[in-house]
Amino acid sequence: MTEQIRIGALVSGSGTNLQAIIEACDKGAIDGRIVFVGSDKRDAGGLERARKAAIPTFVVDYRALESDPDPGNVIPPDDLDIDDLLVKQRLINFRDNPDGARSFLLRRITAEARLLEAMDAYPFDLLVLAGFMRVLTPYFIDRVNIDRDRPRIMNIHPALLPAFAGVDGYGDTFRYGCKVGGCTVHFIDYGEDTGPIIGQRAFQIQPDDTLDLIRQKGLKLEWELYPACIQLFAQRRMRVVRREYQLGKGKTVTRRIVEIKKEDG
Ligand code: GRF
């Protein structure tokens, strides 16, 4: 029997990608099984889908933690090295509002420490973000990616990255007047939607397509792409490598990219 990877999933919304992954595991299109579904929101539809599939669930209520007016209740974890974190983090610009930025990060990390604690009960090989709408700080990422060369947090983004990072990929694609839209699966790094790209799918946008139609076209591709990328991971067919390119005039650009091995046979 093929070895099964253990997949952890985080969701914030309706969980249609989660559903696609559950079904792909069930029918053997992914050599793996989902071992937990966690959420930052009690009412995330994805939790119900997990329960129906008899997958353990838990919630860490980010909003309650992050909006607690009493700063005394924000107790960051003991193992937080704030100086290291401030050097690594690329999520927030400290220049405009250093106190606000620091307070946001400390609150976010407090929530992340709770999330890690809940995840501790379920050992996993791969963590998939399936519509998880909270950016992850280096505190969380470093505790999951124990080996820097073997990232193991995947995300699906509703645009053809690096275009339209952020929360509304299909909306941004539509409003920009793009003639092609798409979705991207990538590994998470310290930036927002900047990590190494694993796979992408594209679709044509017709002149009279509405945003709703664009979303429908995109989601349909997401449900194929995400399981396919997870299966590449399960088959150990991907490797993250660092590439350096000479641009001329002494300039170079370096980027970590995903290399995908052809299937055996
Ligand atoms: C998807 O469009 C995904 O690309 C984005 O959030 C949405 C989640 O949808 N990250 P669902 O919860 O999987 O239905």
Image: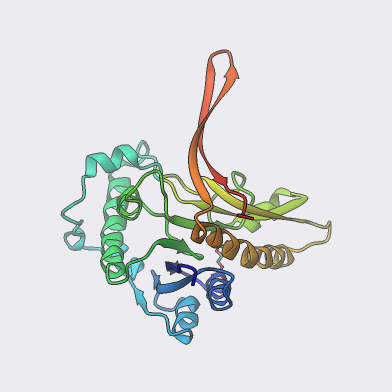
Residue extending farthest to the front is 265
Task: Measuring from the top left, give residue 165's x and y in whole percent.
Answer: 55, 49
Q: How many marks?
A: 0
Residue 94 position (above or below residue 249): below
Viewer-closest of 159 and 256: 256
Residue extending farthest to the right is 207
Q: Is residue 195 visible?
A: no
Task: Measuring from the top left, give residue 127's x and y in whole percent.
Answer: 42, 62
Residue extending farthest to the top is 249
User: Quadrant of residue 116 in the image?
Assistant: bottom left
Q: Quadrant of the C terminus?
A: bottom right
In the rendered structure, the answer to whether residue 43 lies left or right of residue 238 reads left
Residue 242 position (above or below residue 125): above
Q: Is residue 5 visible?
A: yes
Viewer-closest of 201 and 93: 201
Task: Measuring from the top left, give residue 18's x and y in whole percent.
Answer: 52, 72
The picture quadrant for ligand 1 comes to: bottom right
In the rendered structure, the answer to whether residue 131 lies left or right of residue 37 reads right
Residue at the spot x=49%, y=39% of the render?
241
Residue at the spot x=49%, y=68% of the render?
2
Viewer-closest of 197 and 112: 197
Residue at the spot x=26%, y=61% of the render?
113
Task: Give the colour scheme shown.
Answer: rainbow
Residue 50 position (above or below residue 70): below
Viewer-closest of 153 and 69: 153
